[in-house]
Image: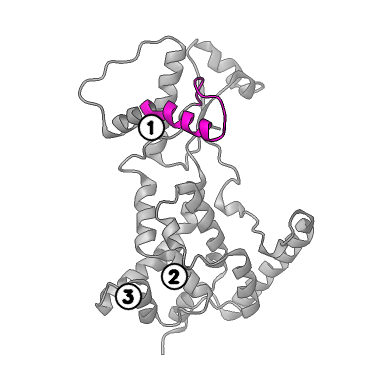
Amino acid sequence: MPRPERLASWQHGLSTFVLSRLRLIIPSLDGHYDRLAKAPAAQWGQILARYAAFQRLRRQASESEMDHRTRQARWLCARHTWERKNRCFSEDIQASWPPDPADGAEFALGTWIASPEQIAGSKLEYTVPISPTGRALAFDIASDKQLLMARFSELIDSEREAAEIAPAIRRGPNSLAERKLAAVRRIWPKLIDNARREADLQTGPPYPALQWRPEPANSEQREFLKAIREHCIVPLWDMQLAGAATRKLVTAQALYPKMREKRSLLAKLRRAEELQEEALSWIPRLGAVVGHG
């Protein structure tokens, strides 16, 4: 018979009523997992934030059954209070999902150059104008580092162009990302004109600024999202919520049908459990979109 702490770490230990309430705010993605294959980081952040409610509420390895029941009761009480206060804003308040402060800001800050009006009243109002080329940059440090660096470069280039500062000469061929961006910029007017024709709008300039940027090959987000897709943590959550993940080996065989060796199956499932817990700290980072404020 497994030890109590090992049992608690696998079985969620939630009451039937709490589980049914969670299922309302975490609709199953079963049958639609293919949609996640190319989902952007921000969408992944929203998906994981919903499943995080289950991950946080499940019984912890060192938690007694009594303490876990108390924590479930507190969650239900807080949930009922929130539903009463917000009932007028939703026709189906029980299925509504309130953002958790632990998952970061509800709206992404973005990455942008602050205008003089936006820094008025702060110390920056007097510091930035000391230099005619001084700028105040707003960004979220939780954002993907490589994407931030690319965005910084783009903003600096645009500000230098506006200030009529000649671009620096770069030796060697352009990077793959630069070539992709240049190719998209060439066809951007044609894409906009095609969309305008379909909407019976006038074609021609001016065209909106191109917001798309190729993702760096060594993006921090890329490796994490690749890992959670390969280890099927969302299908695992759905199985756990549905009560279908009762035995580890059977669960692993259902999630990874191409694998045969028992030890490898259990090792991959163990890593999937670790990724489920790691996902909690990644939610604010995935939601910290690099873009315009």
Q: Quadrant of residue 164?
A: top left
Do residues under tags 3 and 1 come within 8 Å of each other at their CB atoms? Answer: no
Question: What range is drawn magenta here?
Answer: 186-208
Was residue 199 drawn as part of the magenta stretch in this picture?
Answer: yes
Name the spot of residue 15 as percent of width and height, x first.
61, 79
Residue identified by numbered label 2: 236
Q: Which mark is residue 150?
A: 1
Look at 57% across and 31% down and name the residue there: 200
Residue 162, compared with residue 107, is above or below; it is above
Residue type (three-letter) at the residue carrying disc 3: Leu
Name the spot of residue 30 as percent of width and height, x first.
48, 68
Q: Which mark is residue 266?
A: 3
Q: Nearer the viewer, mark 2 or mark 3?
A: 2
SS state under label 2? helix
Look at 58% across and 80% down and name the residue there: 65
Was residue 129 drawn as part of the magenta stretch in this picture?
Answer: no
Name the spot of residue 246 as percent of width and height, x first.
45, 82
Marks 1 and 2, the one that precedes in the sequence = 1
| Label 3: few (<14), some (14–19) or many (≥20) C-alpha neighbours in 10 Å | some
Is residue 61 visible from the viewing direction of this image? no
Instruction: Say which quadrant the C terminus sits in.
Output: top right
